[in-house]
């Protein structure tokens, strides 16, 4: 068993990849239509939106200091509504509206980053609050001035729909042109650039990072900002795909984003994790979701299953972690290494 | 009553909260004649009973440095189970016991994950939040439950010495838990853990057991809230209790519980619930749209935590 | 044999490695018994076993000639064995009374806490230690660290401790607090409490201990009466060879005096120090001596931009120098090696080369912010060779290296930036004797290559050996400046470091 854990620990990504393949295998047997092009296309489209949020979450959690973002879903709703309302009720040019949507995402992320890093409020509390603030704003923005009720927007220009609905050689547009480049960029940045180094340093040991001349606050603020932008991009893709905007679009995405990141090897304590693992994890979650859906399981149980996956991956991570700790525990009288 | 220094510190915070409550009450009272009417005040208190009781449990969790976002889902499950029990004609006292026990059980799941499995509270409870919510759906079979017998509904509508029962429960539990947290060793262990788990462990305090207990207590409180909500609203649906945890956390934080752990009181959290209710109730009466509720509560939490953090920064040595 | 506590043939293994190899140890009633040894020698492990935190793999423990088993700390407390740790383990926002009693409460018949009795007992305990108990209801965080420690001693006494274990107690105390602690220890001795005292500071041992036991490599190298042994012998036993190192320093003070100062500090003050003024000349090694808590670290951190001074000015090469941030200091070539390498200096979970290259990231850039991996690898290899760092590869995770090698990585990290001014804060703390010598050699070499060095150290031999000039600080102010060979000696340094009275007797 121990040897097994060692192998898994060192090759977590490969392990995740194998699970993904396994799941695809299983579901293609259990569920009819699983491997049909239409379904795969469907899954991919859904996966991209979740994926972008999971990337955002991963960056924020890796940056450490209790970093987490519970507001990604609500920010998604808000950004989507901003785009929708500008285009649907105020007849903005769609691309201008898109800029505003992206701006909303960036602003939302920046606000979180500001409260966490400049005002020094714990991220959990900040994003718990902004989760409700952004949700509330989304509802307010969606209010139809005439009737005074929140109303969805379904008036989107046709030249906008290609982002979310067109395909290139069978592959969804947003996957090829947006998601995959973003994945490569983020992965590159984490692995190969100074920014990525800063992130891992700050996430591993905040004090040492500061003592090494790194700006902890700036690095973390940037992750929240980038996260917000990613959310904005997801909002654009989503509104284009479903050709509408509703204030409850992001309702369930918070849990999904966090679960995906944690499953992908991002340690909740910071300093650990990479984009490849998150990518595989996105695949696993999407396949799981889709499989359950096709098998006729109610949407609520998809969330329920996700909850179990989150707990399961946290447990798994603990086992690996504890093993590593035990191997290293030597004679020093270690007093209070709080992992808060 | 022999007070610890902690209680004395809290007297200050509770004093502040009470002050704000009074100010707001006067403010809203002058803006709307309805506000200070007996029916409205009673309304407010009934509203806060479920949040206040749950806040007592949440306080203990937050004092240990944790959090529980599955409160609403626990409430939901207990609401469903007790509702079904009510329909089968189970006598009310037994229903209450059933609710408390179920809550305790669900809380123990959270507690085990956090205490024995070492999973961070946010992750564990985020997971159980969804899983429990799916259970609510499963137990309801996709439908809803209503038409409760009067005996059940009397949990909410009944009075004891002319005070509505839910409010009586709240005060009763507040007194019990204040006693427990201030005078019983295990109660003080909760604060010890919140201050320094390492120190507690080395002193021989059974930290894992105490932590588990805290989540069980909280589960019980959430369960009682579930019974009250079911009885009060007369209906239990799949989304019963969804979002409840935000109000509970807000009440707890407003009441002076330090989100970083180590400080907090039951009475403070109930005052926090009262403050929260006055704000939301007042908003309705001055015709602020219901949609802004999340916005305002979120902002309130941020401001409240901000002032707490500012206070913490000023602590310096006084004694050498 | 009037030994009160005995440990016989204790063996403790951690995953196949024997941390303690068949150790015998005994403690007499009412004695102060010092335990010395290098890091990793097994002292901490023995202490943990005696405190019940861990169990030995084999061997027996005896209290008052009766065999005992200590399964957990509570067991140990019940037997009257209590430990006061280096990092005060306190409940910050709880009162002093609660800090003393939680886990060991005085209860009423109904099981609730009897606050009144606890208050009375707390007063008793503190008075017996010679302390005025006027703060017992306040949160313990409002006490100074020295008082917190004394409160923890009161807590230990409350366990009716017959054996009190101190782990590096003076590491965090000011001079006055240390003196107060010693007074308390002497009182405890009179009460027949046995005291086991771990310390790295040999001077203290001669001050307060009756006997000393030296640990090396998991074995008890011998127990001696303090009267019958001297410092050199102890160090020899600890290290296994005589530490007779005489470093020749060719270019010393004279050359420094002729040049203009590279850094001038004029009258800076903050809440940690007052009216600090000094000049730093290029190429010299300026030593900062003093006891822990004297404010030296804070002055250095001010130079590095981690702390802001409230008053006063700093000049760099004659120009006013506003250093608000470490990156500004680094731009000017000023770097700082922190005292606590694991929490402040290094990233234990990351690789050696990551740690070495992190301050240089800006310079190791190719286009698009990419890190030049080849350059990074070469850099790491260069310093591994230069400083003789024992690491399997550049990708080795830092925590897998020994303390001494980790310290070398810390050096490598800052040396790679080719600093003009190198501020070293306790650079050989927790490091084996051989590595210590290597680091000393490196420091001298750097000075000869023209790097200006500020050396903050609490170890007199080290600072005397290496420094051209020495400034002594005491409780936040400068109390001594010594810049000639005649005046640099331990007596002067100690007297300045301790203010007016000397508590450390003599260095043999």
Image: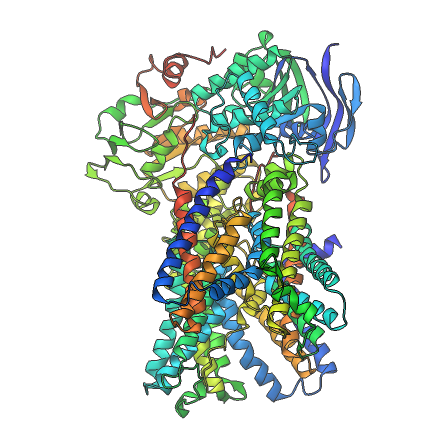
Q: Please tell me whether residue C454 is drawn above or below residue A195 in the rendered image.
A: above
The answer, for residue C350, to whether it is visible in the render is no
In the rendered image, residue C9, in percent from the top left (x then y), is placed at: 76, 24
Indicate how the structure is coloured in the image. rainbow
Q: What residue sits 61% from the left and 86% below the top? A: A39
Q: What residue sits 19% from the left and 36% below the top? A: C318
Q: Please tell me whether residue C254 is drawn above or below residue C95 in the rendered image.
A: above
Tell me how many marks there are. 0
The answer, for residue A292, to whether it is visible in the render is yes
In the rendered image, residue C83, in percent from the top left (x then y), is placed at: 62, 27
Q: Please tell me whether residue C263 is drawn above or below residue B299 in the rendered image.
A: above
Q: Nearer the viewer, residue C33 or C102?
A: C102
Q: Nearer the viewer, residue A77 or A326?
A: A77
User: In which image quadrant can residue C11 be found?
Assistant: top right
Q: Nearer the viewer, residue C160 or C240?
A: C160
Position of the N terminus of chain C by quadrant: top right
Q: What residue sits 28% from the left and 42% below the top? A: C323
Work out which residue is located at the far top of the displayed protein and give it: C227
Please give left or right for residue A310 compared with residue C151 in the image: right
Please give left or right for residue B42 compared with residue A157 in the image: right
Please give left or right for residue B144 compared with residue B2 in the image: right
Please give left or right for residue A318 compared with residue C334 in the image: right
Work out which residue is located at the far front of the displayed protein and give it: B161
User: In which image quadrant can residue C287 be found?
Assistant: top left
Q: Please tell me whether residue A58 is drawn above or below residue A2 in the rendered image.
A: below
In the rendered image, residue A229, in percent from the top left (x then y), is placed at: 41, 70
Q: Nearer the viewer, residue A54 or C329?
A: A54
Work out which residue is located at the far bottom of the displayed protein and give it: A158
In the rendered image, residue C229, in percent from the top left (x then y), is placed at: 58, 10
């Amino acid at each position: 068993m121990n040897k097994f854990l060692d192998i898994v620990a060192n090759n977590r990504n490969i392990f995740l990849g194998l699970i993904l393949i396994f799941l695809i295998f299983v579901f293609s047997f259990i569920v009819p239509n699983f491997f049909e092009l239409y379904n795969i296309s469907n899954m991919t489209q859904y996966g991209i939106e979740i994926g972008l949020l999971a990337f955002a979450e991963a960056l924020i959690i890796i940056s450490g200091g209790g970093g987490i973002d519970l507001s990604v879903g609500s920010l998604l709703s808000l950004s989507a509504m901003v785009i929708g309302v500008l285009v649907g009720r105020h007849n903005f040019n769609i691309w201008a509206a898109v800029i505003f949507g992206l701006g909303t995402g960036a602003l939302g992320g920046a606000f979180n980053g500001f409260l966490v890093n400049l005002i020094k409020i714990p991220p959990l509390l900040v994003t718990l609050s902004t989760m409700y603030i952004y949700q509330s704003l989304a509802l307010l923005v969606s209010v139809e001035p005439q009737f005074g009720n929140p109303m969805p927007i379904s008036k989107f220009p046709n030249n906008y729909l290609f982002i979310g609905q067109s395909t290139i050689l069978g592959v969804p547009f947003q996957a090829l042109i947006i998601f995959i480049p973003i994945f490569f960029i983020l992965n590159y940045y984490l692995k190969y650039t100074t920014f990525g180094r800063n992130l891992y340093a700050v996430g591993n040991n905040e004090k040492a990072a500061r003592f090494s001349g790194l700006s902890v606050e700036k690095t973390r603020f940037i992750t929240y900002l980038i996260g917000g932008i990613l959310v904005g991009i997801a909002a654009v893709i989503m509104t284009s795909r479903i050709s509408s905007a509703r204030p409850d679009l992001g309702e369930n995405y918070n849990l999904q984003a966090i679960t995906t990141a944690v499953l992908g090897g991002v340690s909740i304590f910071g300093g650990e994790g990479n984009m490849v693992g998150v990518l595989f994890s996105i695949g696993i979650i999407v396949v799981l979701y889709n499989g359950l859906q096709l098998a006729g399981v109610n949407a609520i149980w998809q969330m329920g299953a996700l909850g179990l996956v989150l707990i399961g991956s946290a447990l798994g991570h603990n086992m690996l972690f504890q093993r590593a700790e035990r191997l290293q525990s030597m004679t020093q009288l270690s007093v209070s290494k709080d992992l808060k | 009553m022999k007070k610890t220094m902690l209680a004395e510190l809290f007297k200050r915070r509770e004093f502040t909260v009470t002050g704000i409550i009074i100010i707001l009450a006067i403010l809203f009272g002058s803006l709307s004649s309805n506000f200070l009417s007996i029916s409205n005040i009673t309304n407010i208190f009934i509203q806060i009973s479920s949040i206040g009781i749950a806040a007592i449990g949440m306080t203990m969790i937050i004092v240990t440095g944790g959090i529980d976002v599955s409160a609403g889902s626990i409430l939901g499950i207990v609401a469903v189970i007790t509702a079904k029990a009510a329909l089968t004609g189970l006598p009310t006292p037994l229903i209450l016991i059933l609710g408390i026990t179920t809550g305790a059980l669900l809380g123990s799941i959270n507690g085990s994950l956090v205490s024995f499995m070492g999973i961070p509270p946010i992750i564990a409870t985020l997971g159980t939040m969804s899983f429990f919510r799916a259970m609510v759906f499963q137990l309801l079979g996709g439908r809803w439950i209503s038409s409760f017998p009067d005996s059940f509904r009397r949990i909410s509508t009944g009075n004891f010495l002319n005070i509505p029962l839910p409010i009586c429960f709240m005060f009763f539990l507040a007194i019990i838990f204040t006693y427990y947290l201030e005078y019983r060793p295990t109660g003080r262990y909760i604060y010890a853990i919140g201050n320094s788990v390492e120190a507690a462990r080395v002193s021989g305090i059974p930290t894992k057991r105490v932590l588990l207990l805290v989540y069980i207590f909280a589960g019980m409180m959430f369960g009682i809230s579930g019974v009250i909500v079911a009885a009060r609203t007369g209906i239990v649906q799949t989304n019963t209790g969804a979002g409840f945890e935000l109000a509970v956390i807000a009440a707890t934080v407003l009441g002076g519980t330090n989100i970083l752990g180590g400080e907090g009181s039951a009475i403070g959290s109930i005052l926090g619930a009262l403050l929260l209710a006055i704000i939301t109730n007042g908003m309705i009466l001055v015709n602020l749209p219901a949609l802004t509720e999340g916005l305002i509560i979120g902002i309130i939490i941020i401001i409240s935590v901000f002032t707490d953090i500012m206070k913490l920064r000023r602590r310096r040595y006084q004694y050498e | 044999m009037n030994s009160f506590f005995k440990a016989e043939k204790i063996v403790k293994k951690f995953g196949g490695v024997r941390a303690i190899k068949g150790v015998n140890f005994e403690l007499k009633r009412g004695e102060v018994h010092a335990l010395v040894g290098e890091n990793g020698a097994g002292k901490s492990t023995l202490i943990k076993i005696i405190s019940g935190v861990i169990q030995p793999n084999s061997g027996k423990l005896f209290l008052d000639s009766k065999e005992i088993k200590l399964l957990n700390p509570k067991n140990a407390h019940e037997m009257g064995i209590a430990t006061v740790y280096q990092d005060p383990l306190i409940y910050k926002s709880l009162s002093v009374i609660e800090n003393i009693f939680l886990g060991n409460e005085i209860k009423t018949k109904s099981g609730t806490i009897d606050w009144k009795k606890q208050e009375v007992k707390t007063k008793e305990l503190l008075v017996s230690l010679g302390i005025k108990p006027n703060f017992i209801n306040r949160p313990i965080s409002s006490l100074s660290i020295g008082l917190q420690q004394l409160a923890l001693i009161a807590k230990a006494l409350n366990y009716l401790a017959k054996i009190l274990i101190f782990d590096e107690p003076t590491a965090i105390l000011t001079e006055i607090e240390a003196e107060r602690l010693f007074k308390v220890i002497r009182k405890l001795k009179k009460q027949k409490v046995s005291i086991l005292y771990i310390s790295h500071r040999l001077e203290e041992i001669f001050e307060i201990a009756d006997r000393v036991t030296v640990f090396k490599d998991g074995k008890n190298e011998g127990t001696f009466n303090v009267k019958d042994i001297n410092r050199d012998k102890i160090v020899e036993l600890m290290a296994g060879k005589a530490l007779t190192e005489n470093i020749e320093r060719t270019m010393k003070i004279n050359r420094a005096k002729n040049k203009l100062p590279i850094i001038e500090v004029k009258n800076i003050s903050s809440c940690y120090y007052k009216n600090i003024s000094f000049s730093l000349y290029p190429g010299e090694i300026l030593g900062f001596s003093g006891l822990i808590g004297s404010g030296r670290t804070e002055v250095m951190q001010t130079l590095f931009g981690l702390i802001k001074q409230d008053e006063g000015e700093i000049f760099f090469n004659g120009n006013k120098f506003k250093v608000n941030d470490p990156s500004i200091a680094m731009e000017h070539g000023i770097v700082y090696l922190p005292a606590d390498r694991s929490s402040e200096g290094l990233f234990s979970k990351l690789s050696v080369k990551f740690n070495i290259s992190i301050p240089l990231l800006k310079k190791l850039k190719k286009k698009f912010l990419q890190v030049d991996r080849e350059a990074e690898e070469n850099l790491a290899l260069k310093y591994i060779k230069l400083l003789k760092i024992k690491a399997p590869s550049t990708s080795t995770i830092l925590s897998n290296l020994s303390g001494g090698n980790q310290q070398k990585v810390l050096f490598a990290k800052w040396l790679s930036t080719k600093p003009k001014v190198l501020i070293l804060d306790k650079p050989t703390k927790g490091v084996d004797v051989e590595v210590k010598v290597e680091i000393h050699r490196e420091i001298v070499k750097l000075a000869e290559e023209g790097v200006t060095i500020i050396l903050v150290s609490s170890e007199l031999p080290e600072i005397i050996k290496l420094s051209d000039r020495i400034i002594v600080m005491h409780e936040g102010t400068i109390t001594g400046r010594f810049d000639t060979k005649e005046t640099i000696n331990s007596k002067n340094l100690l007297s300045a470091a301790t203010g007016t009275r000397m508590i450390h007797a003599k260095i043999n």
